Amino acid sequence: MIRVGVVGYGYWGPVVARNFQSADGCELAAVSDKNPSAIERARKTYPGIQIASDASEIIQSPRVDAVAVITPVWTHFEFAKAALENGKHVFVEKPFTSTSAQAEKLIELAASKNLRIMVDHTFLFTGAVRKIRQLIDEGVLGKLYYYDSTRVNLGLFQHDVNVVWDLAPHDLSIMNHLIDAQPEAVAATGQSHFNGLEDIAYITVYFKDSIMAHINVNWLSPVKVRTTLIGGEKKMVVWNDLEADEKVKVYDKGVDISSGQGVYDLLVSYRSGDMWSPRVEQVEALKVEANYFAACIQKNEAPFNDGAAGLRVVRLLEAAGQSLKQRGRPVEL
Ligand SMILES: NC(=O)c1ccc[n+]([C@@H]2O[C@H](COP(=O)([O-])OP(=O)(O)OC[C@H]3O[C@@H](n4cnc5c(N)ncnc54)[C@H](O)[C@@H]3O)[C@@H](O)[C@H]2O)c1
């Protein structure tokens, strides 16, 4: 049984704690938060476990095997490093760290101690993303052309990170998981209207073989939208995460090109076939992820959402930040 200590019991911490409590091969052993009201909530929900206002009590506890870091991003490195130094496996929130140098240090530290790092890219464990990955693996979509995601809503404004660091880690991790190619360059534009932190941004990622990704994140949208289009040579997918049923729709639509004699003789025919909605497993993604975390530790295997996967996202966020400052000049990776 992997005994998990959760550091950070604000908005997301209770969700993570609940899932570790119910996961196979795991139990919730301890919770820490520096905020007294969070401590009170944790104590009421889990009367039998260790509750501490000082995170180091949990990080150093011999009764904890793994530490889940569910605090603001600027604290991830400090807590994850201390946990690894104390021989604990770590589960770290997205985005993994504030800088790629920090991520590299944690990966090195974990490797030197044969400890696991898992970065909470929760969406990778949703039924929808697992179904889309399956469609790609089975060749249903054919060669990928693009990934185009819209993740907009009103707020929640964060005080420490801009909308790119808050919302885009979801899309960047999904994009990395679905596209079997390395990103080559990132261009990002955005604007801040209130506190110096961008509240709206458009990120474009260029890959080899003409694959392109575009991500729109926005805290100033009057409506919530969570829609991703994935264009492939054979089929195209529309994933609307706000749909209760039929989240994923596969369209047999596309273009078939044949060229005639000269460059002006391009013959384009449009294909407009059936649409169907594959069955998507309705499970809580974090539960699947918590089970997988325990299994990876028990089998001594690196998870696919390991430190390296977290680092890839942080590198893209850094490149997007550089490009934002230069009004969209592409930054090579
Ligand atoms: N995977 C997801 O879908 C998802 C969803 C929401 C948030 N998150 C991530 O979770 C993390 C936390 O976000 P949140 O929305 O819960 O933030 P939050 O501000 O609601 O909660 C953070 C908690 O950490 C506590 N904390 C801060 N410093 C601490 C310290 N030194 N010792 C102990 N406790 C400390 C705070 O008191 C607070 O209760 C962020 O990295 C965020 O990106 C991920």
Image (cartoon, grey):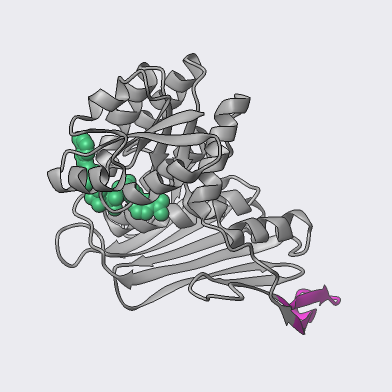
Say whether residue 154 is left or right of residue 144. left
Mark yes or no: residue 319 visible: no
119 lies above or below 197: above
Write the residue at 56% across / 48% down. 288
Residue 121 placed where, x, y %? 47, 48
Mark yes or no: residue 80 visible: yes
292 lies above or below 218: above
Write the residue at 76% across / 74% down. 263
Number of numbered discs on residues: 0
Q: Is residue 179 magenta?
A: no
Q: Main secondary structure of the magenta part?
A: strand
Write the residue at 65% across / 61% down. 132
Say whether residue 58 is left or right of residue 123. left
Which residue is outermost to the top? 112
Say whether residue 113 is left or right of residue 300. left
Magenta segment range?
A: 251-274
Towards the viewer: 171 or 256: 171
261 lies above or below 183: below
Give the image quarter of residue 141. bottom right
Towards the viewer: 43 or 186: 43
Residue 200 placed where, x, y %? 30, 66
Which residue is outermost to the right? 261
Residue 111 placed where, x, y %? 50, 19
Residue 205 placed where, x, y %? 50, 56
Give the image quarter of residue 277. bottom right
Which residue is outermost to the front? 48
